[in-house]
Amino acid sequence: MGALILLLGMTSEENADDFERLHALISGTADLKAFLDGVTGFGSGVMTRVTGSRIECAVTLRRSKRSTTIAGSSDDAILLDGIEQRLGSGPCVEANRTGVTVLLGDVSSDRRWPEYSRSLGEAGYRSVLGVPLDLETDSAAVLNFFAPAAGLFTADTVRDAELFADMASRVLRLTLRIVTADQLSGDLKSAMEGRTAIDVASGIIMAQNRCSQQEAMDFLLRASSTRNIKLHSLCQDLVAHVSGEKKAHTHFED
């Protein structure tokens, strides 16, 4: 890991430790949502450390053809991030659109997003920092940092937030590659299991009626249409009836 940190250009011992802890989240969490919860909890800790005041953190992740994932270091962070997504306006939305960091410096004087600012103030927060993550894919994510007072996000602390976002981006890119590979594997396995049921059912029809595979498939398709049931479900039912097992099994070599 030390060599990796040097390759990434991180010379600060504290930053290196932060990166190692972020990297450890990959193997220490069970799924993407748990990983993002860990990232926001860690981000909250980092920014609390550099500002000297409790900072909450949320992340919004959008992936192509997948539902949006929101995670946060607290219920407040998740709620406020969700409100911003529902309104479609705010520093996080703006940071995602422009690809640059966006600061809402003070809810009492910043007039850009009045409805969102009102929600922030009612929840006890005065300032928000939206920092985009560079994922280099068709995915997009933004970190939202929530401060209880105005003036905590100085030029120095904004740079600290951007440094943390850079580290989080590197680790999240790796996590998304792993998750995508797992999902593709799962989709392929599901498709193959569905195909197995159809092939076995076709074989049963061929044996019972001494017909060709095409004739067996035509029979199954007609039955599926007549009974208004998906072909895969029909075939699973047929296999279960004949074999006494709940479904046809596909055997994989891992």
Image (tube, helix red, strand yellow):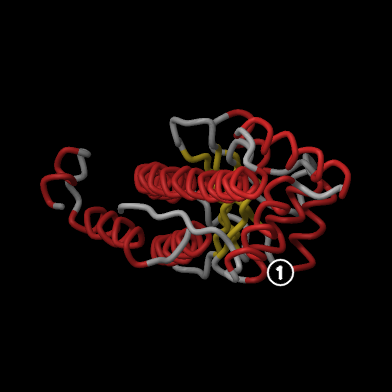
Which residue is at the front of the view, 62 or 94?
62
Task: Locate residue 243 relative to residue 174 in the image: left or right.
Answer: right
Mark 1: give few (<14), some (14-19) or many (20+) Cα within 10 Å: some
Task: Locate residue 35 relative to residue 20 in the image: left or right.
Answer: right
Residue lying furthest left: 3
Q: Residue at x 45, y 35 (%)?
A: 134
Q: Residue at x 38, y 47 (%)?
A: 178
**Against 229, is 240 above or below?**
below
Residue 156 visible in the current orientation = no
Q: Residue at x 88, y 44 (%)?
A: 226
Q: Amino acid at mark 1?
A: Gly
Q: Which residue is mark 1?
A: 124
Q: Residue at x 76, y 47 (%)?
A: 230
**Against 155, is 35 above or below?**
below
Q: Secondary structure at mark 1?
A: loop
Image location of residue 56, percent across then percent down: 56, 64
Which residue is at the front of the view, 47 or 133?
133
Image location of residue 79, percent across then percent down: 71, 63
Quarter of image, res 10:
top left
Quarter of image, res 166:
top left
Quarter of image, res 220:
top right
Task: Locate residue 169 relative to residue 249 in the image: left or right.
Answer: left
Image location of residue 248, percent across then percent down: 54, 58
Task: Locate residue 166 relative to residue 141 in the image: left or right.
Answer: left
Image location of residue 11, percent across then percent down: 17, 46
Residue 209 visible in the current orientation = yes
Which residue is at the front of the view, 195 or 202?
202
